[in-house]
Amino acid sequence: MVFSFVIAWAALARPADDEPVLDIGLGITPPRVTHQVAPVTKPDARGFRLSGTVVVGLVVSSQGEPKNVHVVTSLDKDVDQTAVEAVQQWRFEPAKKGDQPVAVKITVEIRFHSL
């Protein structure tokens, strides 16, 4: 199984651990992935033979941690779960407003390609 990802910026603000969540826009430097974990098939799973995209929504906190990770667009229940579990382990250089790190909401497209 091969995967790739694309990050998009969302315009919906809501709290993550009681910190304000800003929109990506003028004056906000977007977050950058610094540690990425690939989705992994569970040992007891039947294996993935699907190709497609799972869209995962999350808030990148001001500490660069993923919060409120959830599926926005589903591909398959098991594939979706591996995508969420992988993104929960990612780490980011947080978004910044000026020199201050801030929380922002983003979406990540994880593309699965069967081999």
Image: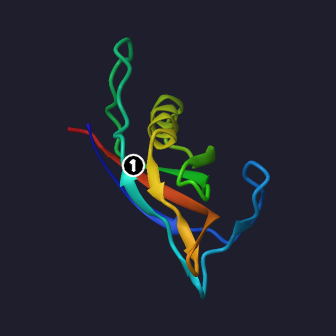
Along the line of sight, the residue nearer the viewer: 66 or 86 = 66
Position of the C terminus, as image quadrant, is top left
User: Residue shown at 55%/44% (left/top)?
Assistant: 74
Q: Can residue 28 be seen?
A: yes
Give the percent coordinates (x, y) of residue 66: 56, 48
Give the percent coordinates (x, y) of residue 45: 38, 17
Give the percent coordinates (x, y) of residue 41: 35, 26
Q: Name the residue under label 1.
A: 52
Horizontally, residue 52 falls left or right of residue 70, namely: left
Horizontally, residue 64 falls left or right of residue 53, namely: right
Its colouring scheme is: rainbow
Q: Which residue lies furthest to the bottom in this view?
A: 26
Give the percent coordinates (x, y) of residue 69: 61, 44
Q: In this view, does 22 lie above or below 106?
A: below
Q: Residue furthest left?
A: 115
Q: Can residue 71 be seen?
A: no
User: Residue shown at 37%/36% (left/top)?
Assistant: 39
Horizontally, residue 80 falls left or right of residue 12, namely: left
User: Which amino acid does the dot numbered 1 rest on?
Assistant: Gly
User: Residue shown at 35%/18% (left/top)?
Assistant: 46
Secondary structure at badge 1 equals strand
